[in-house]
Image: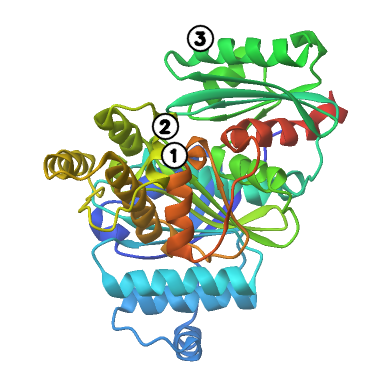
Amino acid sequence: MKEATVRIAQLSCGPEYSGVQKEIYTAAEAVGAEVFFPDLSLADIRRNFRDFGLDVKSGDLKLAIARAVALVEGAAEADAVFIASCFRCAEAAIVRNELRRYIHEHSKLPVVSYSFTERTTSGTLLTRMEALTTIARRRALLARERQTGLTMGVDSGSSTTKAVIMQDNEIIGTGWRPTTEVLNSSDEVIALALEEAGVKRDDLDAIGTTGYGRFLIGERIGADLIQEELTVNSKGAVFLADCQHGPSTVIDIGGMDNKAISVLDGIPGTFTMGGICAGASGRFLEMTAKRLGVDITELGPLAMKGMGEGVPMNSYCIVFGTQSLVNALAEGHSKEDVAAAACHSVAEQVFEQQLQEIDIKEPVVMVGGTSLIQGLVRAMGNLLQTEIVVPHHSQYIGSVGAALLSSGFVEKN
């Protein structure tokens, strides 16, 4: 049966002039969603803008504010909200942030905010749109707190592929390999997880896939659940951290992009993903480890011994970041200090690029492979002035989330 179309209200300034609007429409259509602009009378626009109390000059921003108030008050109906503005405009950035917070605090509508460039494509927006539609359509499934039966989750990430076998709310098997050929990597991790769990493929009640290769792998293995990583990762994170009730914040610094998700009672509310450059991701830390002549698993302990404050580091761009590494070592800085500076630089860029787009509420949970780098966790905790939670099996959150959510299909099989 065809799923109902999800109606996404767009609050924006500038995408029509930059040529990005058609990309927004294309991304929404690809996930069975419809983007629309809430209709308001001129009197309502004036009243809503005045009542909101944020004085801006742009007519488009005034209209976005009025539409946000209408959504919160129920004068306009939507299933989700997409807030977008040009990354060059400071006024728009302020409005985008205030509208995201306002809608999140006064409604249950899932919200994603995004700063676009002229080069933004539908492919860039696809995961965000898919996550919005998933939250709107599968809220009951996302509220699931326990795993039942015997299920498997496979996470095909940009750097690594992981698999987890769960039985009756416990992890009984895991598999991990670097992502090379997507299908071959998935075959390897599935075999490892099944062997450790001591079960056979035919014993499984349900399977879920997530990550970049989710569709290819899901079709190959006949997955019951094929779902984007934003919702799956947040579910796996709060499950492992035992914080499925109340607010929490999930930070996932990946090999190619970063995710920051505000979660309430196990369900994502606002989220953001991406980054200006791979310099603010796990990829930069891999390059740092290589430049320092250590394995990536040794980078964390090395950084914990160093003090990076006196080492200039620029990880906005991976090219300039690499130059910073070379210069720092040539100036005689120790490996420990350079490792600490690199961790701080990545944490700082994530803080500036992603964490300004969501509301940070404790507990703050760091997950993914980079959460095992102690120096990065320490740097993020120092920036946020809080103790970071890194749950056991944090590198498997996508697989765990997929295994947990796929158990919702056990009764249907």
Residue 328: where, in percent of width, then height? 17, 45
Residue 44 left/right relative to 206: left
Kind of element beneath mark 3: helix
Tell me the crowding category of disc 1: few under 14, some 14 to 19, or many 20 or more residues within 10 angstroms, Cα based.
some
Q: Which circle's residue, 1 or 3, is located before the other in the chain?
A: 3
- Distance from the alpha carbon under mark 3 to that under mark 2: 28 Å
Color encoding of the figure: rainbow
Tell me the crowding category of disc 3: few under 14, some 14 to 19, or many 20 or more residues within 10 angstroms, Cα based.
few
Q: In this orientation, does residue 76 appear?
A: no
Amino acid beneath label 3: Asn
Amino acid beneath label 1: Pro
Give the labeled residue for mark 1. 301
Callouts 1 and 3 close, C-beta under 8 Å: no
Give the labeled residue for mark 3. 184
Where 222 falls versus 379 (above or below)?
above
Q: Nearer the viewer, residue 337 or 250?
A: 337
Kind of element beneath mark 2: helix
Image quarter of the C terminus:
top right
Residue 388 left/right relative to 195: left
- Distance from the alpha carbon under mark 1 to that under mark 2: 6 Å
Give the labeled residue for mark 2. 298
Callouts 1 and 2 close, C-beta under 8 Å: yes
Q: In this orientation, does residue 353 appear?
A: yes
